[in-house]
Image (cartoon, rainbow, N blue to C red):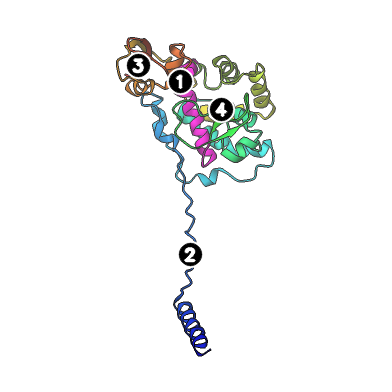
Amino acid sequence: MIRRVGYVMVLVVLLTGCKSKKRTVTRQPKPVVETTTHRNPNRDLPKDGPKESELYPLPVNPGRFVKFPIADTQEYIETFAEMAQYEMRAFGIPASITLAQGILESGSGKGELTRKTNNHFGIKCHTGWDGEFDFHDDDAKGECFRKYNHPMYSFRDHSIFLSSRSRYAFLFNYRRDDYKKWAYGLRQAGYATDRKYPQKLIALIERYNLDQYDEAIVRGGLDTVRAPKKYDVFTHVVEQGDTLYGISRKYTISVDELKRLNNLSSNTISIGQVLNIRKEKTK
């Protein structure tokens, strides 16, 4: 009996000792740090692109351009007209066309894609896009669309998109205030699959008098016609280790343009293959 009581006492002491040494560890949650990997399209101005664009870097304080939410089409115009004119001065794309495309493609800023990506022009990722993106159902289910931190970047990327691809080059030979030719030219160049795309743009421009924003810039001294672009055309023979991306970097031409010039349906090329290259002549 004595032995049994002693055993119980020892056990109690041991348990009490263990309990006294036990520590409660509270793990503090790691702070959540919001980061962004957005690419600034302004850094990607084509080296052989419109030189006047270099005079118009993106504004340091873009906040003054935008107020949210956008109530209707008229408010969309009031919000983004200055931005469209800014891009017209830099790249020569009619502000009326930029605004009409923005209204149509973004649903006056209220479309689902625009609300979640700030993409006002329905520009898809395409080969070589290294910025943020999101998926959205368009011509096909779950297509990849470019995503921006601010609408300002979408407007600038739209300007770069049109001015850096040779299939749109002929547009810049039109008068900068001839919105009808620009509207039909965009459809001809393949910007949209909708056959009535030009008529829709023109209807928006005339309904909301968007051409007034073109006229204001032209009155300010912007030339209405840009001299036609001249190109050097030559070939590149594919060597071991060549890739379409590497070739595009070498000649300052987009991968998409390389594929279009050479009727390529994929990025696969072979040694000895002859590729057509077209570059705008520099002065």
Q: Position of residue 18 (x, y in %)?
A: 46, 77
Quickly name the residue at label 2.
28
- Per the image, the residue denoted by label 3 is 281
Q: Quadrant of residue 65?
A: top right
The image quadrant that residue 137 belongs to is top right
Q: Position of residue 115 (x, y in %)?
A: 62, 40
Question: Along the line of sight, which residue is nearer the eye, 45 or 277?
Answer: 277
| Magenta span | 147-170
Which residue is at the far front?
A: 1
Q: Residues within 10 Å of mark 3 (few under 14, many from 20)?
A: few
Q: For residue 54, what is the image quadrant?
A: top left
Residue highlighted by disc 1: 256
Q: Which residue is mark 4?
A: 214
- The secondary structure that dominates the magenta segment is helix
Q: In terms of sequence position, does the residue under pointer 1 or pointer 4 come before the other? A: 4
- Magenta segment: does it hold 84? no
| Mark with earlier residue (1, 3) | 1
